[in-house]
Image: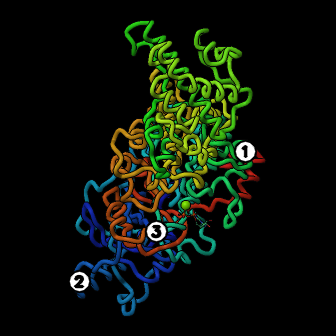
Amino acid sequence: MNDLNPLSSLIQAGQFIGWTCRLDYEQAVVLTCDQWKARARGVPHNCFLLAADAGKNPEEIILLRVTGSAPLPAGHETLLASIRSLMARPSPPTAPAPAAPADGEFQFGGLGCRILGTFYLQAGQLRLGSDLESYFHAPHLAVYRPAGAALEAIVNFVNPERATAAQEEARRLDLPGELPRFPIGTVRYTSTDRLHRGGDCEPAVFYLNAVDFLARRTAVFGMTRTGKSNTVKQLVSVVMRTSRGSGLKIGQIIYDLNGEYANANQQDKGSIAEVFPGDTLRYRMLPTAGFQLILNNFFTQLVEGHTTLKGLIEAGKIPRNADLEAFLSMDFSEPRREEYNSDGEFQRQSGIYQRKIAAYQALLFRAGYELPPHFKITFEANAGIRNKVNPSVDPAGGLTATQACEWFQLARQIQDELITAKGADWIDPDTNALMNLLLQRNDQGAYIPGFRLLQPYKDYHAPNRTTDVCDEIYQHLVGGKIVILDLSVGDPAQRERLGKRIAQHILRQSMAAFNSGRHPPHIVIYVEEAHNIIGRQEALTDIWPTIAKEGAKARIATVYATQEVSSIHPNILSNTENILVSHLNNENEINELAKYYDFRDFSRSLIRAQNVGFARVKTLSNPFVIPVQIDRFDPERERRRAISGGPGL
Ligand SMILES: Nc1ncnc2c1ncn2[C@@H]1O[C@H](COP(=O)(O)OP(=O)(O)O)[C@@H](O)[C@H]1O
Ligand SMILES: [Mg+2]
């Protein structure tokens, strides 16, 4: 055989397992015998087979997947005749002759196969069509179970058109040089893998192409503890390695609901944060050593801080009073000129706004919220008002928080005078309600708990933060860092809100870059336990479905991991290019998945095989599902690689 011919090189004579004895466009039945099977180290359920003309350089090779056993075509007599006739044929060069017909015929049986496609040559290039063009009714094609290098070539095969498209895409994505691809595991067909992966069998490595992954969607499904997080860690580290090896910055952000990426967890002795210490930033909602706060500074990010407080108070089921209600419905966004008819009106509203935020800042301080360093509370008050309230200070020059509290206390004592002096809105209803909360008295002068109601939420305020946390995170991603959002602590509603806000910010910034003709940075967003974050009920305009739809343009890849296929928004699922599934425990989830590609072939095996990391993988480049044992994320090995600095692919 000509080894240079890419078709012939797929055929491994030693892996001969039988002959096709029936073939049509969809199905094939392969006649095999025990000796041949044994010699080829078994024929596992769902394994790939190749069928080709024996004894000469094939012009095409049919790719099959074993889907079960199959009755042999005809009655006993015909079968015997068929077997004898087959045995009379010259066998493929190295296939052993089966045992003497007298016992041999009992050792024959049929394998049911589905046709996955046809490998053929065109202009010297290997191609894979996804069907069978034509067939013979008595097709005695020799059948082989590919292993080692041939199997690796099959599972990683990419059609020339797709390869060209990938090249172009890589250019658009600024991927330099050779198209990077990530090794993620080795082919595995069945839970019992004594024969097909045992002994000295050379494993067939399966690669995920970077262009299939970047700016695309990937789903990781499977029951708890079947290796989803391991897959994500494996992806994060191969992406990091590729990024370091190629010099292309790829930012990665992990929505870590269980806190397993940020901390060394005891079972796994190692975490992403430990493997890439210089390139990983950890964020949490509550103050913790080694973590940045996901939170914002309530004194400076007013709208954000107020929204957080509002969510917490509403979730806290605190008894309401009129001033608290007023506080909850306040809006702290700055007045904009275009909202007003005249400069004069705009100025007046700006003055009101200044006083309102001053009262709010004083309230936060009174409730014990730590001030940012050197913080001053500033607002305008004309000489008339200053003289009435407190002639010794000018709020326009900035008051300390204590001075501001005193100022509002004094202003309250002469509030009636202020109203008559300057018109009713020098203290507008919002400022009035804030002053009530600050001074713990309602409009009727009765005691209210006031600022005390805000005290329990102090931990959600980050006094040292000077920029919006979303922007800070985005800048890390632009710099090619790994950002871990440890969402395992803190209020669940806030967690969801902040999670969305960060995702929104990433999309907005990257879309802005795209729309202005610049190249957005490469970003991969990993969402763990995605059913908690990306609900099926979300409107199409919500952030996660939008990212799934628009993310590609903005070079945002999403990877979501969950045990519930059915919980994922259908729009996201149908826009998902890569799917990796390990064990699922019920028919509903399997049926949901079986709607996609050829996952139906694996329905039984997915329910039955509970092995950790045993995934069935469909990627954009591969026209069919490939069963793969995902590599174990090995922190020690990754750390050594990270230190040696090579791409390590
Ligand atoms: N491919 C794999 N090979 C070997 N062990 C694995 C593999 N995937 C996961 N594990 C181990 O199995 C356990 C559960 O895996 P994990 O990824 O946390 O599952 P999940 O996220 O699906 O709950 C972990 O201890 C992990 O180290
Ligand atoms: Mg997990």
> Quick check: 258 left or right of 330?
right
Tell me if residue 148 comes above or below residue 241 in the rendering.
below
Residue sitting at 64 percent across and 50 percent down?
237
Residue picked out by circle 2: 78
Task: Kindly report the distance in space between the C-alpha atoms of the residues bearing marks 3 and 1.
Answer: 34 Å
Q: Position of residue 450 (x, y in %)?
A: 55, 41
> Which circle's residue, 3 or 1, is located before the other in the chain?
3
Disc marking residue 583:
3
User: Pointer 2: residues within 10 angstroms few (<14), some, or many (20+)?
Assistant: few
Q: Name the image quarter holding residue 481.
A: top right
Judged from this view, the residue extending furthest toward the top is 343
Task: Kindly report the distance in space between the C-alpha atoms of the residues bearing marks 1 and 2.
Answer: 62 Å
Residue picked out by circle 1: 646
Task: Between residue 440 and residue 339, name the one nearer to us.
Answer: 440
Is label 1 or label 2 in front? 1
Is label 3 or label 2 in front? 3
Judged from this view, the residue extending furthest toward the bottom is 102
> Quick check: 108 left or right of 190?
left
